[in-house]
Amino acid sequence: MSEHNIATRIKNILRGIDSFQDLRVLVIGDLILDIYEEGDVERISPEAPIPIVRLKRSFYRIGGAGNVAHIARKMGSQVTIAGLIGDDKEGEILMELLKSTGINTSGVIISPERPTTQKTRIISRGQQLLRLDKESDDEMSSSEEQAFINNLQNILQTQHFDVIIIEDYDKGVITRNVINHTKKHKGSSAVDPKERHFWDYKGFDIFKPNMRELNAAFGKQLPLELAINETFKRLTPEWLIVTMGEKGIYYRTKDKEGTVPAFAIEVADVTGAGDAVIVALSLCKAIRCNVEDACLFANLTASLVCQRIGTFAPEPHDLVHHAKALGLID
């Protein structure tokens, strides 16, 4: 794909981005509260060979499936989130963040059985020094699962969705029963999988693992072509998408396959890049973009996200400015 062809395609996609406003999106998955503790490092601890961070400020970001919902909302779509939080302060903070962005939280269940998943990052001068995780990655208990599915069924029966996205961070919300109930939806469906349920997603429209997840699903590193062929044969998605970091995005449909190269950028943080890709692909497919254009738009969106520290949900004007900075449009 020539640079001129890429630039022309990007221009056409950005012209059609207003169509995202007509879409209703349901995101199902693991909700995460990202906590950032930022400060300065001035010396090494006398107690152990580790830096002492003098904390200056703390801030919160929406993570996990919530970040997927946030990105889709900032793109202009109407978004509902279905997930699970703990009965704790962190859950309250996460709910307030979600609501403040205009996301419908009617699909969120509060559980007394587990904490809200939290990832606390210690950063200094833009560099992450340490991450602390508080979570339970056990699958939902039978009572949690029943409450979640009952609520999910009610949402699916009473609301129309153009797109359903499953964002699996392997923290227990996505179970085989949840997957099977989601399959009954007649609209477009997309999956960002993890290893535990990798092979349970047969028949979803978009299936998007990264290279690590693809290899983990087979229990070993296979030649890419062999892994792709087997995955496509067993799961039969309309679009099989494999993200490959700086190597770009591989796509496979029943008619064609190819690789869309990544844009050359200076990466600050890869947090949320996969979230950006699944949203971009899902929204583009819903407005009938072809797979190559969708992958180009996904690369553009992810490359912008990777230039920011922490999760970032770009708005359409951010993507236009980014495309200009990359020299893709005037």
Image: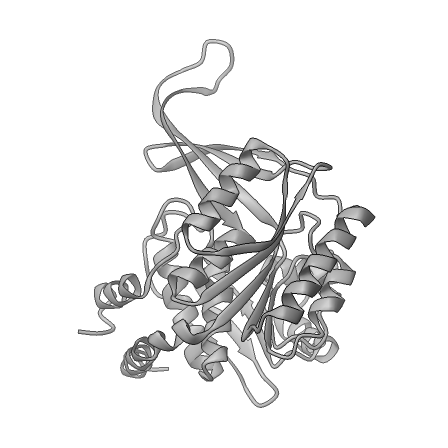
In this view, the residue farthest toward the bottom is 255
Residue 137 placement: quadrant: top right
Decide if residue 12 is on the left or right side of residue 237: left
Image quarter where the N terminus lies is bottom left
Decide if residue 324 is on the left or right side of residue 68: left
* Residue at 38% over, 66% down: 76
- Residue 309 higher or lower than 122, as above or below: below
* Residue at 46% over, 73% down: 23
Spot occupied by residue 216 in the image (x, y as percentages of width and height): 69, 57
* Nearer to us in this view, 230 or 81: 81
Spot occupied by residue 108 in the image (x, y as percentages of width and height): 61, 51
In this view, the residue farthest toward the front is 158
- Residue 228 higher or lower than 175, as above or below: below
Spot occupied by residue 315 in the image (x, y as percentages of width and height): 33, 61
Spot occupied by residue 205 in the image (x, y as percentages of width and height): 61, 77
- Residue 26 higher or lower than 32, as above or below: below
- Residue 284 higher or lower than 114, as above or below: below
* Nearer to us in this view, 263 or 204: 204
* Nearer to us in this view, 222 or 137: 137
In this view, the residue farthest toward the right is 142
Image quarter where the C terminus lies is bottom left
* Residue at 44% over, 83% down: 289
Q: In this figure, which colouring scheme has been used for the structure? A: one colour
Residue 174 placement: quadrant: bottom right
Is residue 262 in view from this perspective? no
Q: How many marks?
A: 0
In this view, the residue farthest toward the top is 46
* Residue at 38% over, 65% down: 75
Is residue 224 in view from this perspective? yes
